[in-house]
Image: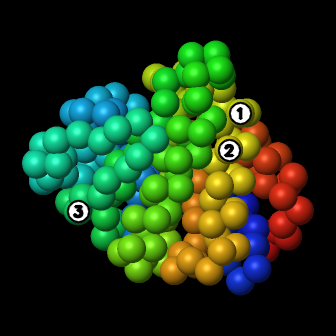
Amino acid sequence: METEFTIGDRRLRLLLGDITEVHADAIVNAANAHLAGGGGVDGAIHRAGGPEIMEECRQIGGCPTGSAVATGAGRLPAKAVIHAVAPRWRGGAAGEARLLSDAYRRCLQLADEMKLASIAFPSLGTGAYGYPVAEAAGIAVRTVADHLASGTSLRLAIFVLFSSRDLSVYAEEVGRLGTSAA
């Protein structure tokens, strides 16, 4: 299941699926601050990409919450993996929204620095870190849409959602932007 929207001459796609199978210049990993691998999206990316991704993560050493770092993509159908660290949900009063927006923004900055044309995101922070999907989707969609409208190298941003429910929440948020469905 896939829906695509336009933002100027850029595209924002919503996709139900497995991010490790998405063909994009970069895929974003929902990483932890130690870049130590884990479950969920993080574990899936490391399993599918192979040990060279973990080796690069070990060399980098870590990444603060609200930021991101890039590695090669190993066996994944991408040029790079951007490892983003979302905040843990603590009720909303501990700066979580700013940190989540910062993590998305840093991923987009790295993609521009690498002159990439496409990027695929999971729903950062909404798994083990407990960020409510509706709140996270609003932050994610606004941050990415603003970036696409700002003169970026990116032509396509994809949100790869794990469940139909998450896809619906993200589609609602994109609808609030007033973008046109392609």
- Earlier in the chain: of badge 2 and badge 3, it is 3
Residue drawn at x 23%, y 40% is 62
Q: Secondary structure beneath disc 1?
A: helix
Q: Which residue is mark 1?
A: 135
The residue at 66%/32% (across/down) is 133
The mark that comes first in sequence, 3 or 1, is 3
Residue beneath disc 3 = 72
Q: Residues within 10 Å of mark 2 (few under 14, many from 20)?
A: some
In this figure, which residue is indicated by the disc labeled 2?
139
- In the picture, measured across the screen, residue 176 lies left or right of residue 143, that is right
Verify CB contact (< 8 Å) between mark 3 and mark 1.
no
Between the residue at mark 2 and the residue at mark 1, the CA separation in whole angstroms equals: 7 Å
**Circles 2 and 1: CB atoms closer than 8 Å:** yes
- Position of 101 compared to 50: left or right? right
The residue depicted at 38 percent of the width and 50 percent of the height is 68
Q: Would you place residue 153 above or below residue 83 in this image?
A: below
Q: Nearer the viewer, mark 3 or mark 1?
A: 1
Three-letter amino acid code of the residue under disc 1: Glu
Q: Nearer the viewer, residue 101 or 182?
A: 101
Q: Quadrant of residue 11?
A: bottom right
Distance from disc 2 to disc 3, alpha carbons, whole Å, reads 27 Å
Q: Is residue 88 above or below residue 33?
A: above
Mark 2 or 3: in front is 2
Q: Mark 3 falls on what kind of element?
A: strand
Is residue 19 visible in the rendered image? The answer is: yes
